[in-house]
Image (spheres, rainbow, N blue to C red):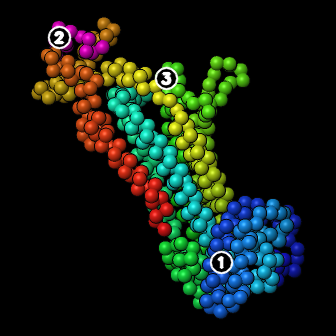
Amino acid sequence: MKMWSGRFSQAQNADFEQWQRSFPFDRVLLPYEVAASQAHAAALAKVGILNAEELGRTVLALEQIAREEIPETDDPAIEDVHHYVESRLVELAGEVGYKLHSGRSRNEQIATDLRLYVRDQIDLISDLLVEFVGTFVNRAYSAGENCMPAYTHTQRAEPVLVAHWLLAYVEMFLRDLGRLSGYRQRLNQCPLGSGAVAGTVLPLDRDAIARQLDFDSPTANSIDATSDRDFALEFVQGLSFLALHLSRWAGELILYSTTEYGFIRLPEQFSTGSSALPQKKNPDALELIRGKAGHVFAAEMALFTTIKGLPLAYNKDLQETQQPVFSAASQVTNMLRVAAGFMASVELDLKRMQRAASHGFMNAQAGAAYLVCQGVAFRRAHELTGKAVRLCLDKNCKLEQLSPEDFSQCGIVADESFYQSLTLQNVLAVHDAFGGTAPARVREALRDAKHKLEIYSGAAHASA
Ligand code: ARG
């Protein structure tokens, strides 16, 4: 029997009846629907709608429903997960099952179920992310003081510690963790007791319901609570940022895996061959991470588009906010699992990176900085060092291979300490402000990152 058949005298159009059902996708919300129903049942018992025996029977039957396999049914009476739980409850516990819907509405139920789902997904994804970021921190520790070129405009710019490069990703992903934990805090209010739109008609203890479901408090306004999907949108936005960062990481590693760069060797576990070209090992894992990010952004746009312009409060359009949330969550979960496995097994060619760090005139700026410390105006020092680079290009040599005479031809007095300023060691050492790549700074940054990560790994769920 449908939940709402009393007022109708005609049968529903068969196509419409199937088409409007959400059970094929909202079945994943069943554990949350059950938990929310148990909290509601307890509140009903407190106000005398269920007696102790009825409450016990209801709670037991709900527990059984949570254990059972969820059927794949096209029974039109099973419109959604809320109908399913109620009708199964009646099968298991009898008439008392019909009492459960007293003082509540599916509008508050779906708002609650979806919040609980998003909260769990935030915890799951944060755990995976902490593990992934951990692989960067480990890698950064074992890279020691090895160097590599840092690029701007995809051209060699300055040498940096490999650890410094890895920590750049740590920063990005820590921001993602921070975003998710902020969203979790904001969403952790319980819509139950909001009714269809104006609030429940029974004197239910909303604080107790919220507590039972580990929410911090009940939501403050029934109209907002039943129509709000900001928490879903924020979650998917947070995932979009994360997918964006994963795609940049993947894009860079694809570049670094080419013969041209040769900074990393692709792990066979995460690569595929070519059906046509026997010699090939392709970075498919990275390419798919980069590619699948698109699905996550699409989910964000789908939510914006669905919610835009909706008058208060609940509208059936809101049913369409579920699938993008489920899809983005599962895409990101899978991306992270593969990314963490990849990162733990990829080989960095530290020797080749180190060699690349001392080619490309990346010590020119440090040379100019030395001249600045000798009192030369920076613009002039830049010009003189540029001339020296020009001379190197003509002579096909490195800056430090020019003779003092060559330098003096460019207007530079090249004494012993000038040559000293051009060494890789010095080039790194002069970047000694907070956030820079001087080895001492990177050691500090590494300790700091490890500490932040420890806080997240202990506290991914702590905002509850
Ligand atoms: N399946 C519905 C959804 O996901 C549940 C809420 C239905 N509410 C209603 N008033 N028809 O939005």
* In the displayed structure image, the side of residue 188 where residue 3 appears, left or right: right
SS category of the residue bearing label 1: helix
Query: Which x, y percent locates residue 207?
Result: 52, 81
- The residue that disc 2 covers is 404
Please name the amino acid that badge 2 sits on: Pro
Q: Does residue 402 show up magenta in the picture?
A: yes
Whether tag 3 and tag 2 are in contact, CB under 8 A, the answer is no
Q: Quadrant of residue 362?
A: top left
Q: Tag on residue 262?
A: 3
Span colored in magenta: 398-413
Q: Quadrant of residue 78?
A: bottom right
**Residue 105 seen from this side:** no
Q: Earlier in the sequence, mark 2 or mark 1?
A: 1
Residue 273 sits above or below residue 175 on the image: above
Please name the amino acid that badge 1 sits on: Gln
Q: Does residue 44 show up magenta in the picture?
A: no
Residue 349 sits above or below residue 446 on the image: above
| Pick the front one: 415 or 14 | 415
Q: Name the residue located 20 percent from the left edge and 9 percent from the top edge.
A: 403
Query: Which x, y percent locates residue 340?
Result: 54, 42
Query: Which x, y percent locates residue 118?
Result: 58, 62
Q: Tag on residue 38?
A: 1
